[in-house]
Image (cartoon, grey):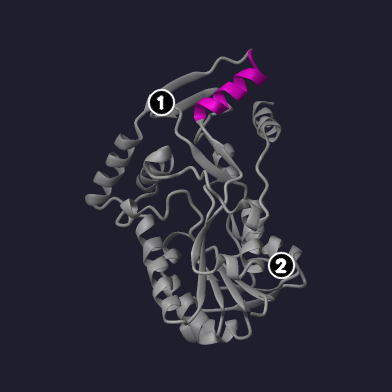
Amino acid sequence: MARIQSVAIAGASGSLGPHVLKALVDANFSVTVLTRSRKAETYDASVKVIEVDYGSVESLTAALKGIDGLVSTVAGESIEHQTVLVDAAIAAGVRRFIPSEYGCCTTNPELKAFPVYAPMFKIRQYLQEQAKAGMLTWTVLTCGAFLEFLFGGPILMDFANHKATLFDEGDNRISSTSLPNIGKAIVGIFTNFAATQNRVVQTSEVILTQNGLLRTAEGLRPDIKWETNKVQTSMILKEGLDEVRVGDFSTPVIMKILAGTALAGNRYGSAFDGTDNELLGIRILSEEGLKEIVAGKLA
């Protein structure tokens, strides 16, 4: 089968989108950005930008004519509405669709009915049905937590105030991949068309634990005294689900559900011991590399 040459990206802004876009451009794909408004962002001169109506199959189909692969990095409520993108991709003859998922435990069937996860299951099932009918192929990329998010705030460690709220006992394992390497993995999916067809692929640049990060921080700066406390992920999750049941879908509530699942370690499968790193060209973050990140946060 002819290789993927032209790729469109839906959701090229935001946290992940620019990194995926850069990786595709650097890999010499012919790249098209689908956008609601071309006024909002500026892109590399080699990138074609097309204004679309994300709610219209006809608008998206016209934009996707001649495109081989489509990758979505949309977020929030837009995730559930990716069925429109799928329908347009089929109508335009797109051969591979990568939906917006990019998480830790998004494929765990126990989470199928949970807020945040339910829309992802819906899209994945829809893609599987279309692929079974021979309409297109798909790949889901699970990459763990975004490395920049874990170190960009007090999620695992509050480096600024030398505090850590340990989830359970602090030994929960969580896979993580940096945003540039997620972009690189997307390129790997398109360049390994047959090997990534109609399946979930996994990347994990590093597996982290809070106690491991604490030991690293203490080894680098033994003069710093850390204040720790513990919370149970099962209780955080219960609180979030209880609040959803009474109609509260606010960001803090959704974050409780994410923390209670994605940060629960092996309970929901947040650490990937088997990966597709080699296939996708992702290198493991070395111990020294991790130390450099931690040292930078302690500086």
- Quick one: 128 or 216, which is closer to the camera? 128
Residue type, mark 1 in image: Glu
**Residue beneath label 1, please?**
169
Residue 213 magenta:
yes
Quarter of the image that includes the N terminus: bottom right
Q: Is residue 146 visible?
A: no
Q: Is residue 191 visible?
A: yes
- What residue lies at 60% left-to-right and 60% top-to-bottom? 17
Distance in Å between CA atoms under marks 1 and 2:
45 Å
Residue 284 magenta:
no
Tell me which segment is drawn in magenta: 210-222
- Point out the residue furthest to the left here: 246
Between disc 1 and disc 2, the foreground one is 1
Helix, strand or loop at mark 1: loop
- Quick one: 196 or 221, which is closer to the camera? 196
- What residue lies at 49% left-to-right and 26% top-to-bottom? 164
- Residue 199 in the image: x percent, y percent? 49, 64
**Residue beneath label 2, please?**
43
- Quick one: 133 or 71, which is closer to the camera? 133
- Residue 180 in the image: x percent, y percent? 66, 52
- Residue 299 in the image: x percent, y percent? 69, 26
Where, by quadrant of the figure, is residue 253 drawn? Answer: top left
**What label does residue 158 carry, if any?**
none
Instruction: State whether residue 147 is above or below residue 117.
Output: above
Residue type, mark 2 in image: Tyr
Specify which label sits upstream in the sequence, 1 or 2.
2
Helix, strand or loop at mark 2: loop
The residue carrying pointer 2 sits among few (fewer than 14), some (14 to 19) or many (20 or more) residues within 10 Å by Cα, namely some
